[in-house]
Image: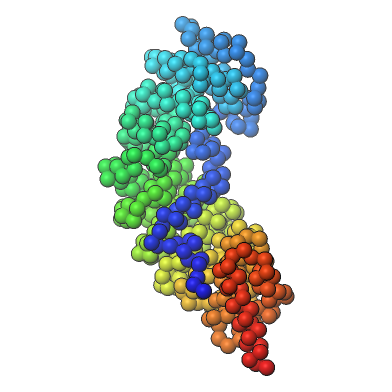
Amino acid sequence: MPPRFKELYKHVPSAREVRQRRLLQDAQLRRLHREQAFMGKRVRYRTTPQESETETEYEFTQTDTEKLAEGLGSADHEQRMEALGTLSSKLEQPSEELRRFIVDGRCMELLTAVISGTDSDETVQSLWCVTNVAANESSQVAGRALDAAPYVVPLLTSSNMEIRNQAAWALGNMAAEGEGARNQLQANGALDALVYLADCETDSEVQQTAWFAVSNMARTPSAYFDSLFDKMKLPQLVARQAEALAEDSTGCLAELAWVSAYLTAAGSTDKIDQFLEAGAADAFLKRTAAAADVALLIPVIRTLGNIAAGTDTQTHQLVGKPGFLDLVARCIGASTGSRAVEKEALWVLSNVTAGSKDDVDAVMGHAHMVESLVRIVETQTFDIKKEAAFSLLNIALVGERVGDLPNERLVSEFVDFVRSQDEQLVRLGVQFIAVLFAQLPGRQGPDLLRGVEGGIDALENLVAVTDSDETRSAASALIDSYYGDDADAE
C-alpha cells in the first residue's frame, strides 16, 4: 500500500491543497490574536473589553438614534463631540436599532461630514466611529464603512499622529471585510498610502497600525496581489523593516510577520523564492531566536510553514538557515506553553520531514527533536498527537530511519489511533504498523504489535467497521502477515 501521509501534508505537485488545509485552521490559530481582533478586525474600546460598561443588545430606541443624529449634525462643537463619544462607545456592541441607523439611516453621511471638517478632535472621534463600524461582524454593517474610505485615505498623510493612526486602523478593518472591500480600497489609493506610511512613519504605534492595515490588504483574493511583489517589493520592505526595528518593537514585528504569512500563503513558487531571496525569513529567525511572545511566534511560524509547504528545494533552503530547527524544536518542546504555537510548529516539521532524506537527517540530528515528538504522541490530545504522527511517519519512510525511533513506546499510541473514530488518525495508525512490519528485520514488527494488549484485536475490529475499502485492505494485509508468519513458524 503506498504511503498516504506525505500527500496529506506536502504534496509538491499540488502545494495549493496544503495551503487550503491551513486556511481551514486559520480561525483557530488566530484566537490568540483576537484579544484585539476578530476576523482580522479590531474594535477600539473606550476602556478595555473587560472594563467596558457597554452591555450586549442594550436598549436603544429610535428616539435615541434621532437624538444621536441631531447631535452629529449639530452646529455646536460640544454637542458633536458628545454624540461622537456616545456613538463610538455604543458601537462596541451595537444594538439592532443602532445597526439599522448605520445600514439604512444617515449615520455614515453624518460621520463623513465630520471627518471632512477641520477640527482635529472631531476628526479623531469620527474615525474612531468608522473604525468600529468596520469592525462589526455583520457584513451589512461593516460594508457601510467603505462609504468613508475616500475621506479616510487622505488622512494617512495628516500632520496629526493620532489622526494618522486612527485612519490606518479604520482602513485595516475595512480591508478585512473581503475581496470586494480590498479592491475598492486599492482603487481609492489606500494600499500605496498605507505602505508608504508603514515604511516612513517615525511613531512606533502608528507604524504598527499601518502594518496591521497592510497585512489585511495583503490577504487574498485580491485583484492587485501580484503588484505587492512586482511593484511594491513588499518582501524586500518587510525584510528591511524587520532588521531595523528596535528590540522592544515586538508588536510591529508581529504585524510584519502577518504580512509575510499572507504573502507566502497565497504566493506561487516564484513568489516564495522572492521572499527567500529578500532575506525576510532570515530576519524573522534572527529576531525570534529567544522570543517567547506567542502573538509574535504564531505569524512567524505560520510564515515558515508556508515556505516549508513549497517545493523540496525551498524546504531545504529553509532547513539550512541558522536558527530554523532551533526555533521549531523550542516551539514543540512545550517551552512556550501555547498549544497553538506547538501545533503550528508541528505542521512546519511535518512538511520538513516530507522533503528529502537530508532534511530528515538534519531533524534527527537535532537534540531533543524526536524525544519531543514522542512525548507529544504519548501525552497530548489527539489533535496534537496527529500533527506529531505525520513527522514520525515521514522520518520512518522518507528518511528510512524507522529503526532509530523508540518503537516500543510508539506502537501502543498508534494502535490507539486505529481504535479512534477519526478516519485520518486510523489511517496514520495503520500506516505506522505497516512500516514496522515492512522495514524492521525479522519478526520485530509483529512482535511489537503482540506486545500491545488488544493490538491485533484493534486491526480485526477495524476490518469489520471501516467504510474505507483502502483501509480495510491495508488492515487485512497486516492481519494476514501477523498470523501468516505464526503459521509458517509452526
Q: Which image quadrant is residue 18 in?
A: bottom left
The outermost residue toward the left is 231
Q: Is residue 397 above or below residue 327?
A: below
Residue at 34%, 53% (x, y): give it: 268
Q: Residue 1 at what x, y percent from top left? A: 51, 74
Residue closer to the observer: 438 or 258: 438
For the question of whether residue 401 can be seen, the reply is yes
Q: Residue 460 at what x, y percent from top left? A: 68, 73
Q: Which image quadrant is residue 231 in?
A: top left
Number of dots carrying numbers: 0
The outermost residue toward the right is 453
Q: Which image quadrant is residue 95 in?
A: top right
Residue closer to the observer: 237 or 138: 138
Q: Residue 193 at what x, y percent from top left? A: 33, 32
The outermost residue toward the top is 75
Residue closer to the observer: 463 or 222: 463
The outermost residue toward the bottom is 490
Q: Is residue 315 above or below residue 176?
A: below
For the question of whether residue 370 can be seen, the reply is no
Residue closer to the observer: 435 or 53: 435
Residue at 62%, 60% (x, y): give it: 422
Residue at 58%, 73% (x, y): give it: 473
Q: Residue 368 at what x, y percent from top left? A: 54, 68
